[in-house]
Amino acid sequence: MAPHDPVESIFNVLKTHKKDNFFELTDGKLLVENAPLLFEVPSNVRFSSFSSICQTSSAPIPLFHRAHSTSFKGGFLGFTKEDSSNCLMNSLGKFTGRDFHSIFRFKTWWSTQWVGNSGSDLQMETQWVLLDVPDTKSYAIIIPIVEGKFRSALYPGKDGHVLICAESGSSQVKASSFGAIAYVHVSDNPYTLMKEAYTALRVYLNTFKLLEEKSVPPLVNKFGWCTWDAFYLTVEPAGVWHGVNEFAQGGISPRFLIIDDGWQGINFDDQDPHEDAKNLVLGGTQMTARLHRLDQGEKFRKYKAGSLLGPSLPIFDPNKPKLLINKAVEIEHAEKARDKATRSGVTDLSQFEIKIEKLKKELNEMFGGDQENSFQAEPLCKDLGQHLYNSPCNSDNSGMKAFTRDLRTYFKGLDDIYVWHALCGAWGGVRPGTTHLNSKIIPCKLSQGLDGTMDDLAVVKIVEGGIGLVHPDQADYFYDSMHSYLSEVGITGVKVDVIHTLEYVSEEYGGRVELAKKYYNGLSKSLAKNFNGTGLISSMQQCNDFFLLGTKQISMGRVGDDFWFQDPNGDPNGVYWLQGVHMIHCAYNSMWMGQIIQPDWDMFQSDHVCAKFHAGSRAICGGPIYVSDSLGGHDFDLLKKLVFPDGTIPKCLYFALPTRDCIFKNPLFDGKTILKIWNFNKYGGVIGAFNCQGAGWDPKEKRIRAYSNCYKPMTGSVHVNDIEWDQLKEVSEMGKAEEYAVYLNQAEKLFSTKPASDTIPMTLEPSAFEIFSFVPIKQLSPIAKFAPIGLTNMFNSGGAIQGLQYEEAIGDGDNASAKVEVKGGGNFLAYTSVLPSKCYLNGAEVEFEWSSQDGKLILNLPWIEEANGISNVTFSFLVC
């Protein structure tokens, strides 16, 4: 039951030298290299080698060859039941006393890591489990996948058993047998294992593409601003303009902008079908609302060209968004107090209702005070056909087109402007009867696996209102209608959110796999047509349905839950411990998501109490850096450690991953483990160490909570061998160096180390970090050694180095030199064992500082705008 169609295959499997498969299922045991991996495997479970199942594929020939070259290390598990069903559960066997690392869904939308040593320790909706196999010094993975119209996930069983749940999402779609519902693979390297396993699945399923096959959005190398925390749903043109201007005035101009939720035309079922809902503020209030038009809402539609470019700017109070948000928070607290009283048996709620109505009136008055100074609205356009942008309501002189043009006119470096939308249009989908689309309100039904996940306001609200689902046969038309308009008016990409609502509404549409395929194919086609094939950030999508079915075109997505600046459940210390939780999500999710999409570590706020902690991780994550600062809420000194003046960033070459010694550990609440993540720069490796201890998942309470006893200083160690140099061909030679210069960015220490040296000890306070740069030392002469560290005023110092060229001394009297191309201004640092004879900056001799004690060579570099911030530095060494 292979999910790809053999008729479409380009070629058949090429005969290669056969090797014995590393897996064998015999006598109720799944063996890997003759070591028992699973015991008590039921008799209805079968194993098939990769080559026996995947004999044809439409995948590119190099990938096909690569998958088959390691096919002896992998295979598929299937099972057969007597009765057919739309949801089948079966044990795959059991394990106990074996360390595992896994990823599971703790909400509909978000996944995180979990460790244990028994199949019973797994969590519901586990997306994959990695097992330590010390018997053979290897690692094995079990990945539940898609087969036919079913998707699967792993669940915990009794007495160490691992259960697999295969579900269609529709009572009309049933099966009783699966030949390949899970994939298993083994390797002696956990990172290579991930590459090989997902390459095999890409070739077999042919429903997604690997990251290496796709281009990523240009914004991945840049700094940006998202409007969410600044405005929430109150976002409007004047506020956006003021926000971008604040960054420009602070010396860091965003190169991309994300206009988040709040810009669309949405309303509720009991409102006029063609009028926008008014005065929405906080996320949550909009989750039962539906899209009633496919262009912009009234706030953006009424914008007049040039309004923000002339001398007489519209009146705008930068404090107003915060005042509105604070008032909305008051209302939210009052409503929670009323609901709590109701649950406790209070029958007279009149005092609560009076207070709530009073607060709502005050909020409406605050909104009303702005209206007389706002732009005049264009007439409401009800022609919502595919060529919406040709209507008079959306001329060049008004609306989003005029606004984006004015933004780019004033802010010359603003390359990309993205807008937010939910996969189904809005949180509640598309309102029936208001657009040219065939949409229908579908009640939501959650699968049984989601019963084991965390309570979530978004889920509660979506279930409450149902989803206005555009018929899947119109998915292509739906996305192209929306995106062609957006592209025409100057929007270069979209942030697509709330992706996993599809599984709630698949009953009538052939099940979750079939529904997902139609929607994801429509989204992919529109992305290719309207946004250069790359202009999309996927979010709230951390489930195997999306990664295995929706990523043929999509190349970037979130790898963590939302940035929460405080605990929504009211723990005052959550402002601290939530930040470490966020980093754990991102680091461990990148292990599998990074095979398919460019990991995006999400925004944060630069003035947050833990902003520096976040900034350290973003500096080496390998993705874009963006913030959601409120107006007036910026720490420009911090941002300048992350971003160059031109809005680009010193980005690592790869995506950050946890070090090998962290894989089977719990850096959140085991009370001993420091999270370490590794990455590469062009001329060195980097390790970030973060004390994330203090919170994590509680399986009994089904939520993430504080473990305050773990929020304390932690000790650990770092070694150059923690960097997996072999994972990127371009840097593999650096892993063979005999000696490395090591720089500690926070401690400002510089010294040398060797592969045979002892580990480097460290102690980190709670919510604190250190970034270690490891740069190969070059022997330029018998006495001269050199290694460029980079700009120490940047968190990722080595990311500033763009080029490096050495000239070695061959004989006596020869000169040796090191030529370094550096982007950025500030303190350049290098290690050298001897004093250079001369230093040249852009061809002119300059002075520098050198310390014989630790070999620090320091030079101040200017930011030269005409040279795009590039400086060329040459150090000469005399050889006697």
Image (cartoon, grey):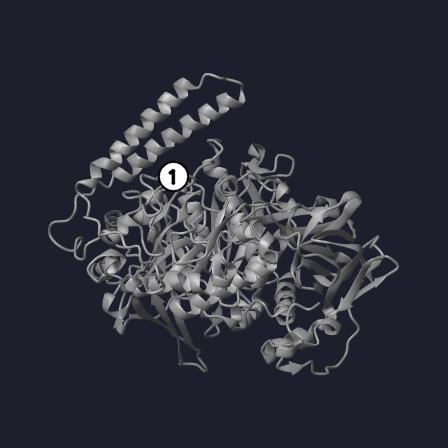
Identify whether 606 is placed above or below 477: above
Residues 816 and 5: in front is 5
Question: What residue occupies the far right of the structure in this picture?
Answer: 27
Q: Which quadrant of the view contains residue 374?
A: top left
Residues 545 and 707: in front is 545
Horizontal side, residue 187 vs residue 718: left or right: right
Q: Is residue 749 visible?
A: no
Mark 1 packing: few (<14 Cα in 10 Å), some, or many (20+)?
Answer: many
Residue at figure coordinates x 54%, y 47% from the top left: 762
Image quadrant occupied by the C terminus: bottom left
> What kind of element bears circle 1?
loop
Residues 185 and 233: in front is 233
Residue at figure coordinates x 43%, y 53% from the top left: 425
Residue at figure coordinates x 21%, y 62% from the top left: 396
Q: Is residue 12 visible?
A: yes
Question: What residue occupies the far front of the structure in this picture?
Answer: 433
Horizontal side, residue 369 vs residue 86: left or right: left
Q: x%, y% of residue 26? A: 86, 62
Horizontal side, residue 560 vs residue 130: left or right: left
Image quadrant occupied by the N terminus: bottom right
Identify whether 339 is placed above or below 624: above
Q: Which quadrant of the view contains residue 802?
A: bottom left
Horizontal side, residue 631 vs residue 585: left or right: left
Kind of residue indicated by mark 1: Leu
Q: Which residue is mark 1?
A: 282
Q: x%, y% of residue 773? A: 48, 59
The number of numbered discs placed on residues in the rendered structure image is: 1
Residues 44 and 866: in front is 44
Q: Which quadrant of the view contains residue 294?
A: bottom left
